[in-house]
C-alpha cells in the first residue's frame, strides 16, 4: 500500500491535518511513536480556544488561529465537542499595565476582533468580585473560550478514520529514503511508503526534518507548569483572567476548565530535554502564590493536580510551515502554545499547500460526522442517565461504560494516559486513591503500560 | 421519598449508626454507599487489629471487620453504588444510582459519614516526573487485598504515620520489597515501636530527616531522589507510596451551605455532632484526620442516639451557641461549638484536639477566661488529645478556649 500522505506525529496538529486530508479523500496514514495520540506536547495544553487577540499581525500563526477558531465553532457540535463560553478578561494590576491596555485593545481590533472593549475597576469588580484588590482595569475579549484539551484531537482522528484514514501508534519514524513516487519511511514497525510526508513531530520536529533536509529551525522546548485546583475553586471566576503579556510569554493566567476545575499557569521555562515534563515544587508554589494574588480566596482551595506541558518553541516566533515541492515534504514545525486552536487552521493551510503543489483534494464530499463521548462537566454526562451501571471514578464520576468504550472502538486508548485523557478517570482530587485498582482491573491486558502481576 | 434517617457513607461510623438506629427501633433508615460493597476503608486493610471491644471476638482483619459491620446493621437498607453528588437544605440528598440515574432522597435527619482519603502526590507539590507508579496506601491496599495484584516489586514509602506501617504490611503481604521509609522530621510520626518494628521485623530502613526531592522515570517510576544531611542520593524503585496526611472527604459539602472548619478540614459540629444545618449530622473521620475505626464506630453509636433525640425534637435550637476557640500549636479542636444547655440530652463528649508540631507544657481549658481544667502534657503531631468536658458549666458560658502554655 502506498499512501498519498504520511503524517509524522499524532499531536493535536497532526490529528487535525489527518482529518482534513482524509476529508479531502487523500489516502492518509498518521504515524505516532507513542502508545497513543497526544502523548507529547499536546497532552499538557491549557485548553483555551484563542481568539488571536494578541497574535502577531500578518503572522501565519494569527491566520491559523483565526481560521481554526472559526472552524471549531462550525464543527464542534457535529463532533459532540464542548465549548465553555467564558470570555476572557485581560487584567491590568498596576498603572504601567493599565497604560498598555489601549494598545492591546487596538491590536486586538487590528487582528479582526470587533467585539473587544475595555472596562474600569468598578465594572471589573462587578463582574469578578473575587479578584484581588489591585485589579485596575481590563480589556474584555468576549470570544476567548475554554474547550476540552484532548477530545477535539480524538474527534479529528476518528473522523479521519471514518474517511478511510489509518493510524499507526508505537510507530517511531527513524529515517526515510526518497523514491520515484515519494518516500519510503523506516519506522519501528516496518516501512511505510507515501507520496508526501507531513512533518508534524512537535518537540521532535527538527530531528524529523533532518530526514528531508538540514532543519532550518531548532526546537528548544518551553515548559509550562500548571496547578489544577479542585472544582469548588471554579466558582471564583466567570471569565478567564489573563495577564498583560510580556515579550516572552502570555504570562500566568487563571482559567476554568471544561471539567469544572480551575487552573493557574503556565510557567515558561526553556529546556533542552524534549521528553522531561517534570514539575518543580518551587515553581508550583510560586504559581499558587501568583494565583492567590489574583484571587485571594484561592488560598483556601485545595490542589487536585499538577502538570507540565512542553511547547515546541523554536528560534522563530511564527509557525514554521512550508511545502518543499522538490522533496515531496510539508514541514509543520514550531507550533507553540496556540496549537490547540490553531490546529484546524493549520490543517486548512496544509491542505492548501497540498493542492497547490502535490495533488487534488475533494471538496464536495459530504463529511461523515463521528462523535466523541462528552467528558465536560457543563454538558450531560452518562452518570446522570439511568442504567449507567457503575461509577468507577468517584471524583470525576466516570462510569464503567465510559471506561469500557474508551478501551474499544476504532482508536482504543493505547496506554493509561490515553485512557485518562479519554475519560478523566483517576484525574480528580483523590488521584486514584479510590479507583486506581478498579480502573487497572477493567483495563487489564488492554493497556500495555499497566502491571498485570498477581501477588504470590 | 422521606426517610427518618439518610446515612451517607457505609464505613464504620455510618454502619455503626445504622445498627444503633435499628436496635432502637428506628428502621426507616437508608445507607447510601458509593462502592459496590459497604464497609469503608477496612475493606482493603488486610491486616488484623480491627473490631477490638466492638464485637465479642478476637481482633480481626479489616475485610472481616467490614463484613461484620454490614451484618450487624440488622437488615437496614444499604444501597451500594449509590453516589451522593450534593446536599441541600431540608435534608435533601442528591443521589445518583446505576438503575435510576439522579434522584433526591430526603431525610428528617441526614448523617454524613464519608470518611477520609490520603493526600496524593499532586497536592503535596512534589517535584519530578509524573510516571505511572506514584500512589497512596489506600490505592496500594486495593490493588493487593481487593484485586490480588502486585503492582510493584520495590517501593519507597513516604511518611511514618500509623497508616505508613499499614503500607509496610500490605507490601509484605504482596511480596513487594520496601526500599526505604522516608520521614522529614527527626522522629517517626507513629509511636516509637513502629520504628523498631519497621527495622527489625520488616528489615526496612527508616530514614528520618530525609526529604523526597524528586521522582524520576518517564513512563514508569525508576527511582526517587532524596536529600539527607545535605547530601543527595537516589534510590531505585518502581513505586512511590505517599502515606497519610489524611483529609476529610468533603467534596459533596463544598457547594453546600454547611460550614467547614479550616482546622479539621471537615464540617464544624456541635456537641451533638450537628453541622451548621441542624438537620445534618456528621461522624467518623469526615470530622477530622484521622482516628481509628474503633473511635469512628463509637461516634456512630453516639450520633445515632443524638439523631433519635433530634427526631423527637429533644435537641436544643441553634442558638445560643458558644464557639470553642484554640491557639497554636493546636491545629484543631472539635466539637467546634457548644449549643444550648449542655448535658440536656445525654453526656457531653470530650473535646478532641491535635497539634501541628511537637510541644510540651500545660494544656488548659478556659471558660469565660477562667481555667476549669489543666494538665501537664507532652504533645506530638497526629496523636489524639482528649480534653474532658465534665467541668464545663451546663449553661451560660460566653467563651470556651483551649490553649497550651508551653514550657
Image: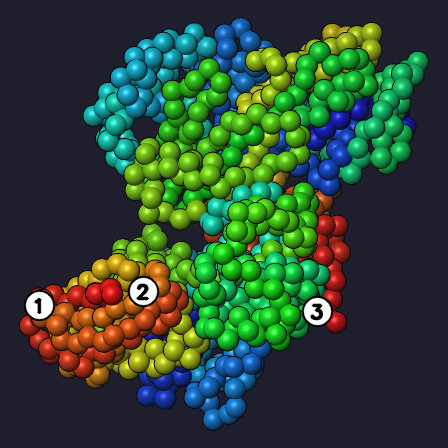
**Classed neighbour count for the residue bearing mark 1: other residues with Cα under 10 Å, few (<14), some (14–19), many (≥20):** few
Distance between the alpha carbons at the discs numbered 3 and 1: 57 Å
The residue singled out by tag 3 in the image is B175
Measuring from the top left, give residue B385's x and y in whole percent: 31, 72
Q: Residue A170 carries which label?
A: none
* Mark found first going from the N terminus, 3 or 1: 3
Q: Which residue lies furthest to the right in this view?
A: A180
Q: How far apart are marks 2 and 3 (CA)?
A: 39 Å
N-terminal of the pair, mark 2 or mark 1, is 2
Front of the two marks 2 and 3: 2
Say which element carries label 1. loop
> Between marks 2 and 1, how big is the CA–CA gap?
25 Å
Q: Which residue is drawn at 52% across and 73% down?
A: B194
Chain under disc 3: B
Disc 2: CA contacts within 10 A as few (<14), some (14-19) or many (>=20): some
Asked if marks 3 and 1 fall on the same chain, the answer is yes
Amino acid at each position: 500500500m502506498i499512501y498519498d500522505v504520511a503524517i509524522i506525529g499524532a499531536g493535536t496538529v497532526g490529528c487535525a491535518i489527518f482529518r482534513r486530508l482524509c476529508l479531502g479523500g487523500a489516502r492518509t496514514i498518521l504515524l505516532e511513536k507513542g502508545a497513543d495520540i497526544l502523548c507529547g506536547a499536546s497532552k499538557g495544553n491549557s485548553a483555551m480556544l484563542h481568539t488571536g487577540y494578541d497574535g502577531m499581525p500578518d503572522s501565519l500563526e494569527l491566520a491559523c488561529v483565526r481560521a481554526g477558531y472559526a472552524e471549531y465553532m462550525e464543527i464542534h457540535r457535529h463532533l459532540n465537542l464542548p465549548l465553555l463560553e467564558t470570555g476572557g478578561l485581560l487584567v491590568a494590576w498596576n498603572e504601567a499595565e493599565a497604560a498598555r491596555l489601549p494598545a492591546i485593545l487596538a491590536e486586538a481590533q487590528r487582528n479582526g476582533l470587533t467585539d473587544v472593549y475595555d472596562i474600569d475597576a468598578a465594572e471589573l469588580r462587578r463582574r469578578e468580585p473575587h479578584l484581588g484588590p489591585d485589579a485596575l482595569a481590563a480589556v474584555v475579549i468576549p470570544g476567548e473560550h475554554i474547550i476540552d484539551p484532548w477530545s477535539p484531537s480524538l474527534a479529528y482522528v476518528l473522523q479521519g478514520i471514518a474517511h478511510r484514514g489509518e493510524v499507526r501508534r508505537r510507530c517511531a519514524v527513524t529515517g526515510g529514503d526518497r523514491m520515484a513516487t515519494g518516500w519510503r519511511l523506516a519506522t519501528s514497525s516496518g516501512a511505510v511508503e507515501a507520496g508526501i510526508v507531513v512533518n508534524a513531530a512537535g518537540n521532535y520536529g527538527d530531528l524529523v526534518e533532518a530526514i528531508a533536509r538540514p532543519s532550518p529551525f531548532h526546537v528548544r522546548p518551553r515548559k509550562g507548569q500548571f496547578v489544577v485546583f479542585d472544582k469548588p475553586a471554579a466558582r471564583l471566576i466567570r471569565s478567564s483572567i489573563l495577564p498583560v503579556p510580556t515579550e516572552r510569554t502570555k504570562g500566568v493566567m487563571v482559567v476554568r476548565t471544561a471539567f469544572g476545575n480551575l487552573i493557574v499557569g503556565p510557567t515558561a521555562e526553556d529546556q533542552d530535554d524534549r521528553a522531561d515534563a517534570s514539575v518543580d515544587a518551587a515553581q508550583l508554589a510560586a504559581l499558587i502564590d501568583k494565583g492567590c494574588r489574583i484571587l485571594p480566596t484561592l488560598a483556601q482551595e485545595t490542589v487536585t493536580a499538577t502538570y507540565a506541558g512542553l511547547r515546541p518553541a523554536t528560534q522563530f516566533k511564527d509557525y514554521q510551515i512550508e511545502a518543499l515541492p522538490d522533496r515531496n515534504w510539508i514541514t509543520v514545525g514550531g507550533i507553540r502554545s496556540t496549537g490547540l486552536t490553531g490546529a484546524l487552521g493549520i490543517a486548512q493551510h496544509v491542505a492548501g499547500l497540498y493542492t497547490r503543489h502535490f495533488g487534488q483534494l475533494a471538496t464536495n464530499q459530504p463529511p461523515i460526522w463521528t462523535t466523541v463521548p462528552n467528558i465536560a462537566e457543563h454538558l450531560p454526562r452518562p452518570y446522570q442517565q439511568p442504567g449507567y451501571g457503575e461509577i468507577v471514578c468517584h471524583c470525576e464520576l466516570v462510569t464503567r461504560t465510559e471506561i469500557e468504550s474508551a478501551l474499544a472502538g476504532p482508536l482504543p486508548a493505547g496506554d493509561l494516559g490515553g485512557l485518562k485523557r479519554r475519560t478523566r478517570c483517576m484525574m480528580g482530587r483523590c488521584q486514584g486513591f479510590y479507583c486506581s485498582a478498579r480502573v487497572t482491573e477493567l483495563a487489564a491486558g488492554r493497556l500495555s503500560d499497566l502491571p498485570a502481576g498477581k501477588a504470590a | 421519598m422521606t426517610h427518618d434517617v439518610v446515612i451517607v457513607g457505609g464505613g464504620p461510623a455510618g454502619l455503626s449508626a445504622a445498627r444503633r438506629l435499628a436496635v432502637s427501633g428506628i428502621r426507616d433508615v437508608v445507607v447510601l454507599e458509593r462502592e459496590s460493597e459497604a464497609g469503608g476503608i477496612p475493606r482493603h486493610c488486610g491486616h488484623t487489629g480491627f473490631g477490638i471491644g466492638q464485637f465479642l471476638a478476637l481482633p480481626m482483619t479489616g475485610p472481616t471487620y467490614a463484613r461484620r459491620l454490614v451484618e450487624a446493621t440488622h437488615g437496614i437498607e444499604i444501597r451500594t453504588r449509590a453516589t451522593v453528588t450534593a446536599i441541600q437544605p431540608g435534608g435533601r440528598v442528591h443521589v445518583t444510582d446505576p438503575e435510576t440515574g439522579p434522584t433526591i432522597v430526603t431525610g428528617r435527619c441526614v448523617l454524613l459519614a464519608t470518611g477520609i482519603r490520603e493526600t496524593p502526590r499532586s497536592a503535596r507539590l512534589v517535584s519530578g516526573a509524573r510516571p505511572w507508579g506514584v500512589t497512596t496506601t489506600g490505592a496500594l491496599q486495593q490493588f493487593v487485598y481487593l484485586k490480588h495484584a502486585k503492582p510493584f516489586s520495590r517501593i519507597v514509602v513516604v511518611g511514618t504515620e500509623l497508616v505508613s506501617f499499614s503500607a509496610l504490611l500490605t507490601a509484605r503481604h504482596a511480596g513487594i520489597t520496601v526500599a526505604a521509609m522516608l520521614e522529614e522530621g527527626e522522629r517517626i510520626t507513629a509511636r516509637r515501636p513502629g520504628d523498631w518494628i519497621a527495622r527489625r521485623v520488616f528489615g526496612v530502613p527508616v530514614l528520618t530527616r530525609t526529604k523526597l526531592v524528586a521522582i524520576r522515570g518517564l513512563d514508569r517510576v525508576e527511582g526517587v531522589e532524596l536529600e539527607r544531611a545535605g547530601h543527595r542520593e537516589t534510590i531505585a524503585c518502581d513505586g512511590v507510596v505517599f502515606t497519610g496526611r489524611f483529609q476529610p472527604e468533603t467534596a459533596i459539602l463544598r457547594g453546600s451551605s454547611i460550614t467547614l472548619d479550616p482546622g479539621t478540614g471537615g464540617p464544624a459540629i456541635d456537641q451533638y455532632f450537628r453541622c451548621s444545618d441542624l438537620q445534618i449530622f456528621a461522624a467518623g473521620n469526615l470530622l477530622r484526620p484521622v482516628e481509628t475505626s474503633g473511635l469512628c464506630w463509637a461516634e456512630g453509636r453516639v450520633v445515632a442516639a443524638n439523631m433519635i433525640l433530634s427526631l423527637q425534637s429533644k435537641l436544643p435550637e441553634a442558638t445560643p451557641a458558644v464557639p470553642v476557640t484554640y491557639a497554636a500549636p493546636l491545629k484543631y479542636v472539635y466539637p467546634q461549638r457548644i449549643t444550648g444547655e449542655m448535658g440536656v440530652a445525654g453526656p457531653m463528649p470530650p473535646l478532641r484536639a491535635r497539634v501541628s508540631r511537637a510541644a510540651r507544657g500545660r494544656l488548659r481549658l478556659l471558660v469565660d477566661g477562667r481555667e476549669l481544667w489543666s494538665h501537664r502534657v507532652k504533645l506530638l503531631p497526629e496523636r489524639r488529645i482528649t480534653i474532658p468536658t465534665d467541668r464545663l458549666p451546663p449553661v451560660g458560658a460566653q467563651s470556651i478556649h483551649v490553649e497550651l502554655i508551653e514550657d
